[in-house]
């Protein structure tokens, strides 16, 4: 079996992350066994239908899940990692393959609320929310809220400079949230998220309710942050937008990661049947709806959750597939993937009896 190379400059490492919520019909399995890395200077896009667990996963990294949520697994964030981190074999510098998680890394899933409040939120990790206007105080100007955020985070950066990081115009700092357009509200939210100069930015559906020019503008701003060395985890159902900014695509279905791939490879040759269906649903690719409905997270089918909607399903699919490497940079959880590499486990899957 081929083994993918260990990624370097790791800023975020998620391993076996699961989230459960209590429900009337049993536990809601919002996220199950999620594992992935995100590097400095990289944008990773989490994609999938609504309710697949994307936003729950990112909220768990900041300790923002509601009371009663049961969380398992690990998620290390390293505040010291950067694009320039040493990556030579055997190095003990932050971000090297030999040392992650480093002594400076924090497991945010195990961290106490005090640690999340004082060291993580706003300082190590910034959040660009889905609805920016609902995350700011409506009766205070953007400038006053940005100034307070800088002060609370111990930053002596001038408000105008902090606004400029997100290309928010200084002549609008005296405006109230309701006076801003959707695009400017998004820039204000980004400026607030960047106030503490975090290296990791979580962008949760940042293009919701924006028209196409503003979507393109928002994606350009996120890409500019990545190119300056930030790590961005983008949550989106907009595959077209993800294609313009993401370096890698992570596909989620029914709470599980079913495929990871470099962006170009994902759009050119998706491996998982669900990935194929997502792309086929794009207007420019035929606008073909995915048959059936996503399963309820309290009543997931046995084996592969996509099995009831999949034209390639066989009896082998009644057993749960694991996320395995099919190439140096690609992984898929499927017994019958479209795209395969030199992986004995995949060959065993394809030879499974029908």
Image (spheres, rainbow, N blue to C red):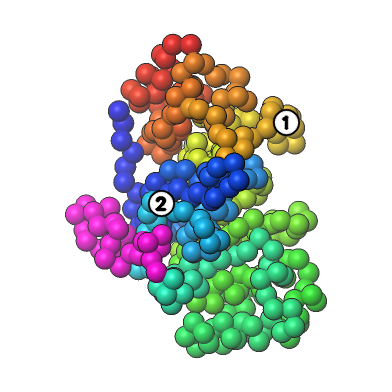
Q: CA distance from mark 2 to mark 1?
A: 34 Å
Residue 346 seen in render: yes
Dividing the picture into quadrants, the one containing residue 116 is: bottom left
Residue at screen point 51% across, 24% down = 338
- Taking the magenta stretch, the answer to whether it contains residue 93 is yes
Residue 288's quadrant in the figure? Answer: top right
* Dot 2 alpha-carbon crowd within 10 angstroms: few under 14, some 14 to 19, many 20 or more: some
Please, is residue 275 above or below residue 316 in the view?
below
| Residue positioned 41% across, 32% down in the render | 322
What percent of the width, then of the height, locates residue 59? Answer: 53, 59
Residue numbers of the magenta segment:
89-112
**Of tags 2 and 1, which is closer to the observer?**
2
Image quadrant in which you'd find residue 168 = bottom right
Seen in the image, is 346 located left or right of residue 54?
A: left
Q: Residue at x 75, y 58 (%)?
A: 210
Q: Main secondary structure of the magenta part?
A: loop
| Residue situated in front as seen by the camera: 64 or 3 | 64
Is 137 on the left or on the right of 85, as rendered?
right
Q: Which residue is mark 2?
A: 72
Question: Which residue appears at 49% of the width and 37% of the height?
Answer: 259
Q: Which mark is residue 289?
A: 1
Of all residues, the one furthest to the right in this rendering is: 179
- Expressed as whole percent of the image width and height from the top left, the position of residue 175 reads 76, 82
Which comes before the other along the chain, label 2 or label 1? Answer: 2
**Does the stretch in magenta take in 167?**
no
Q: Position of residue 244 (x, y in %)?
A: 61, 49
Label 1: state its secondary structure: loop
Query: Which quadrant does the N terminus fall into?
Result: top left
Residue 7: percent from the left, percent from the top?
A: 35, 49
């Amino acid at each position: 079996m081929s083994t993918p190379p260990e990624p370097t400059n790791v800023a975020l490492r998620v391993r076996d992350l699961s989230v459960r919520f209590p429900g009337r019909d049993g536990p809601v399995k919002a996220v199950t066994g999620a594992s992935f890395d995100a590097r400095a200077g990289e944008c990773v896009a989490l994609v999938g239908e609504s309710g697949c667990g994307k936003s729950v996963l990112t909220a768990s990294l900041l300790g923002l899940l509601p009371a009663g949520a049961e969380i398992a697994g690990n998620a290390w964030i390293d505040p010291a990692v950067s694009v320039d981190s040493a990556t030579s074999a055997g190095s003990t510098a932050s971000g090297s393959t030999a040392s992650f998680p480093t002594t400076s890394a924090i497991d945010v899933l195990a961290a106490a609320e005090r640690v999340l409040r004082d060291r993580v939120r706003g300082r190590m990790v910034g959040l660009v929310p889905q609805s920016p206007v609902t995350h700011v105080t409506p009766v205070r100007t953007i400038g006053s809220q940005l100034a307070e955020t800088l002060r609370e985070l111990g930053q002596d950066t001038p408000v105008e400079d902090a606004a400029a990081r997100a290309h928010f115009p200084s002549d609008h700092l005296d405006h109230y949230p309701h006076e801003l357009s959707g695009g400017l509200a998004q820039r204000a939210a980004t400026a607030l998220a960047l106030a503490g100069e975090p290296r990791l930015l979580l962008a949760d559906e940042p293009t919701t309710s924006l028209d196409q020019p503003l979507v393109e503008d928002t994606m350009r701003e996120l890409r500019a942050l990545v190119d300056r060395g930030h790590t961005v985890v983008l949550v989106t159902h907009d595959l077209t937008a993800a294609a313009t900014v993401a370096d890698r695509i992570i596909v989620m279905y029914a709470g599980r990661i079913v495929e990871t791939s470099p962006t170009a490879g994902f759009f050119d040759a998706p491996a998982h049947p669900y990935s194929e269906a997502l792309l086929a649903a794009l207007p420019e690719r035929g606008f073909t709806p995915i048959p059936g409905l996503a399963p309820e997270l309290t009543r997931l089918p046995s084996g592969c959750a996509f099995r009831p909607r999949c034209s390639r399903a066989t009896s082998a699919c009644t057993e749960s597939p694991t996320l395995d490497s099919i190439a140096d940079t690609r992984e898929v959880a499927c017994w019958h993937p479209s795209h395969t590499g030199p992986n004995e486990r995949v060959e065993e899957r394809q030879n499974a009896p029908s």
